[in-house]
Image (cartoon, grey):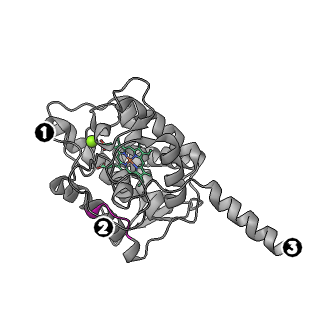
Amino acid sequence: SLSSNIVLALHFASSLALPPASSDAGPWKAPGEGDDRGPCPMLNTLANHGYLPRNGRNISKDMAINVLDQVLNWDATVVSDLYDFAQPTNPQPNATTINLKELTTHNILEHDASLSRQDSGFGPADVFNSKIWNETVAHFTGDTIDVEMATKARTARTIAAASTNALFTFPQLGMNFQYGETAAYQFVFGEWNLDAEDVKNRILTPKNYIEYFSKKERLPTELGWEKPANRLVMDTLQSFTVSMMQLTQTQMDEAA
Ligand code: HEM
Ligand code: MG
């Protein structure tokens, strides 16, 4: 019958999605002994929820694409590129997986001037650092983070790192990646208004989501956050990133 065909079709569609990395995916658990984490608060978070392997190891490209699709509504056009940038952090020849801890290898993807981590010249660049994070949060001057605050926090951190770290470097990849990261948290946790005339209103992000996520490496579901309704594709990421760079330039011109 028609209705049983629909049931069958739905069943087939859901079976196409790869199963989550572990059978206990969903509930948050702090990393246990022997579990590795890295410098990316979101990949750590996804491992803490068991969407990625809780040990933080052996993450394949297919797994990354499927998990970021299912949990965050990120399109493969974004995740595929991101994953490819990360692949060289696995030192094994012809590796087809990445490991969260190895993402910390300095200046492959990990870079100085992170929003919540110290520069590698001062010590481990993978763990959350509350002193650095508090400097970042100081730029979030309301309950809602607008794009102007997000870019100011980004720029201020770069200036602070460059002026205090004798070993400071910022290669081109990190230079671009930093904007991608600042875009990323807004895309995941903010309300999208990408057609807004004023750049600063294009995404409005509840500050409590960001505080919770950054400190706990946990999805802020209990605060009301839900998987974004909008799908993030590469074109959107690129145009938003460009508008943030332009806004940064304006802010620097005004400050000069
Ligand atoms: C930072 C990798 C997905 C948000 C980082 C860093 C790496 C990384 C290596 C460290 C850079 C540094 O600050 O030195 C990846 C890879 C991903 C991925 C390979 C996917 C395959 C995501 C997603 C989000 C995200 C989906 C969404 C919120 C962030 C943020 C930072 C970051 C906000 C900056 C943290 C800080 O500055 O302290 N990521 N990431 N990432 N990532 Fe990811
Ligand atoms: Mg860093």
1 or 2: tag closer to the N-terminus = 1
Q: Label 1 belongs to which residue?
A: 122
Amino acid of disc 1: Phe
Q: Residues within 10 Å of mark 3 (few under 14, many from 20)?
A: few
**Which segment is the magenta one?**
216-220
3 or 1: tag closer to the N-terminus = 3
Vertical placement of 29 versus 116: above or below? below
Instruction: Judge whether residue 120 is colored magenta.
Output: no
Under tag 2, what secondary structure? helix
Instruction: Give the mark toward the camera: 3 or 2.
Output: 3
3 or 2: tag closer to the N-terminus = 3
> The C terminus lies in which quarter of the figure?
top left
Instruction: Judge whether residue 219 is colored magenta.
Output: yes
- Which quarter of the figure has residue 7? bottom right
Residue 221 on image: x %, y %: 40, 72
Q: Is residue 212 left or right of residue 83?
A: left
Under tag 1, what secondary structure? helix
Amino acid of disc 2: Tyr
Q: Label 2 belongs to which residue?
A: 212
Residue 80 on image: x %, y %: 53, 40
Contact? badges 1 and 2 (CB < 8 Å): no
Cα–Cα span, label 1 and label 2: 25 Å
Amino acid of disc 3: Ser
Q: Label 3 belongs to which residue?
A: 1
